[in-house]
Amino acid sequence: MRLIGLIFGTAVVSLLLVFLVLPTLLVIPMSLGTAEYLEFPPQGLTLKWYAAFFRDEEWMAATWFSLRVALATTFGATIVGTLAAIALTRGDLPGKALLQALTLSPLIVPHIVIAVAVFLLFAPLKLNGNFFGFVIAHTMLAVPYVVITVTAALQRFDATLELAALNCGASRLRAFFAVVLPDIAPGVAAGAVFAFLASFDEATVAFFISGIEGKSLPRKMFEDIDFNLTPVVAAASTVLVVVSLAVLGGLQLLQSRAKAASAQARGEVQ
């Protein structure tokens, strides 16, 4: 009976994974079709839509704009999120539960609500369609991911190691950078990757605060779906997927190397 349940559960999970991944996989052959419109299965194979994507100034401007915003967001969200996680994990703050709820609220509140609020706030400040406006909005959305991953890393950290460094005469700042940060680095790196993806792939808020000059790649894709539906959109989607997978793959590689180095260090100590 247990074997039947295991097989049934595995089959259900496999079907769900296929259902979630299949639309993403279908975009790839659609981006290689020879027709002037999206079709599946494609009647022929060509790379001309990728050439059109990389040669188009508007597509390239939107892509580089999204990359610059995502990198700036990653930097800002990683710093703010790490500091917030330390304060929420170790600090004895008044209203700590409320502060934690507010920090994680962008994960709970629908993005359409956040988008409307950000648009109304940014409009009089002339931050709509602005690089700094995008960075501020996306940092707000990305910070919760960093807080969650760093908090989990801090909860696994052995605080006696930091106390030992302090007893040996190290300042709190030096103890953090020499002892705490190397130990929680995988959590910080994971949070940074999620912050990058949260910004680079974000569409709802970007749709509201984009302008004529400051336009993200997801917003450009929305426009082409409405007014110029060609396989270039599928090519852009594939590029978006490839970048996301490359970033996740890089994180996995770094974590694997960190685990190997940690295991090696433990072996040398023993």
Image (spheres, rainbow, N blue to C red):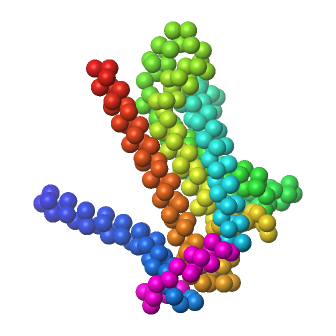
**Residue 88 is covered by the magenta coloring:** no
When the figure is inspected, residue 92 is found, relative to residue 133, above or below; the finding is above
In the visual, does 213 lie left or right of 242?
right
The N terminus: image quadrant: bottom left
Between 7 and 41, the one lying in front of the other is 41
Q: Residue at x 83, y 60 (%)?
A: 123
When the figure is inspected, residue 252 is found, relative to residue 10, above or below; the finding is above
Q: Position of residue 70 (x, y in %)?
A: 64, 54
Q: Residue at x 47, y 59 (%)?
A: 245
- Res 23 → quadrant: bottom left
Q: Position of residue 139 (x, y in %)?
A: 66, 49
Evaluate whether residue 140 shows in this view: no
Between 130 and 3, the one lying in front of the other is 130
Q: Which residues are magenta?
A: 38-56
Q: Position of residue 30 (x, y in %)?
A: 49, 81
When the figure is inspected, residue 103 is found, relative to residue 218, above or below; the finding is above
Q: Residue at x 42, y 48 (%)?
A: 252
Between 120 and 133, the one lying in front of the other is 133
Q: Position of residue 65 (x, y in %)?
A: 70, 60
